[in-house]
Amino acid sequence: MNSALQPIVAKYGQLLKRVDHWFDRSAKAAGNAVQCGKGCSSCCRGLFDITLLDAFFLRQGIDKLAPRLREVVHARIAAQLQSLRLIWPEIMPPYIINALPEETLDRLMPEEDETPCPLLGDDGLCLVYEYRPMTCRLHGISLVDISGESFQDEWCTHNFKDEDPRKRHDLRWEFRDLFQRELVIFRELTYTLLNQKINELDTLIPLAALIDFEGFDWKRWWEMNEDKIKNAGFPENQRSIPSPD
């Protein structure tokens, strides 16, 4: 790994540990109302977008898989890539999806898709659990900030069948601070890769295994695609983000 990227991995890993601590504490407080547990993979279906930061972190876990297991994962991804090309024929490195039309994104990520995640083991366990994206760690419980601001109104259908978790103050957490800190780290990553601090670049979980974070000419790619991505609806990248206290 490029030495400039190592501090980013470490910093993001620490932030994700805070997320895990919140979820574990919340699940314990909720008791049987939360059914998330080892071997449950109900949410590990279909495609969904992840940030380039999550893709970078996830790639570390994929690269640490045993060679034979890594071959299995890449074979699954190759099969998915063929299906993705039917919808997105121009798919190519670095596999960023932000400039795609909304209708293309909807076709790539249909809600009814039940395709298992390529990183899901036959036993229902995540093969790269310690490196899974933030969205995987947050899924299952509604995300309400300690201020009362809601960041996610939905929760897993297996959880909280008899109550509304949004009304439980013991499940609230510092989500605004979390996402602000995530964004600061994300901008560190994009500055290292692109020489610019960008607020949002996304990909899909299977494509994370294919992204080249060291050999690819990221700066040249950004020069060629900056206007296209921003014109596709990227006001986020015009914003300045203050550092958290």
Image (spheres, grey):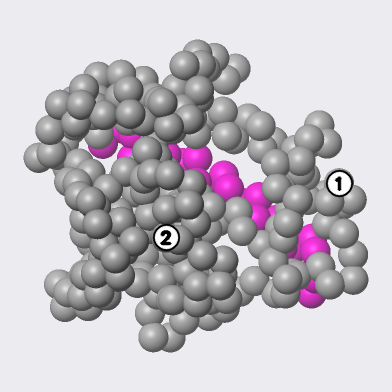
Does the magenta portion include 8?
A: yes
Q: Which residue is mark 1?
A: 169
Q: At x 72% / y 61%, what residue is drawn? A: 155
Give the prevailing secondary structure in the magenta stretch.
helix
Please tell me how crowded label 1 is: few (under 14), some (14-19), or many (20+) other residues with Cα within 10 Å: few
Asked whether residue 202 appears in the rendered view, the answer is no
Please tell me how crowded label 2 is: few (under 14), some (14-19), or many (20+) other residues with Cα within 10 Å: many
* Quadrant holding the C terminus: top right
Q: Which residues are magenta?
A: 6-33
In front of the other: 111 or 201: 111
Name the residue type under label 2. Leu
Residue 117 in picture, x, y percent from top left: 41, 71
Residue 204 in picture, x, y percent from top left: 38, 55
Q: At x 58% / y 48%, what residue is drawn? A: 19
Q: At x 43% / y 32%, what residue is drawn? A: 232
Q: Is residue 62 above or below residue 113?
A: above
* Quadrant holding the N terminus: top left
Does the magenta portion include 118?
A: no
Q: Which label belongs to residue 112?
A: none
State the count of labels: 2
Asked whether residue 213 appears in the rendered view, the answer is yes
Disc 2 to disc 1, C-alpha distance: 36 Å
Q: At x 20% / y 41%, what residue is drawn? A: 213
In front of the other: 155 or 131: 155
Q: Is residue 27 above or below residue 151?
A: below
User: In the rendered view, does 101 fall on the left or right side of 38?
Assistant: left
Q: Nearer the viewer, mark 2 or mark 1?
A: 2
User: In the rendered view, does 216 fall on the left or right side of 206?
Assistant: left
Q: Is residue 222 above or below residue 28?
A: above
Identify the image quadrant of residue 220: top left
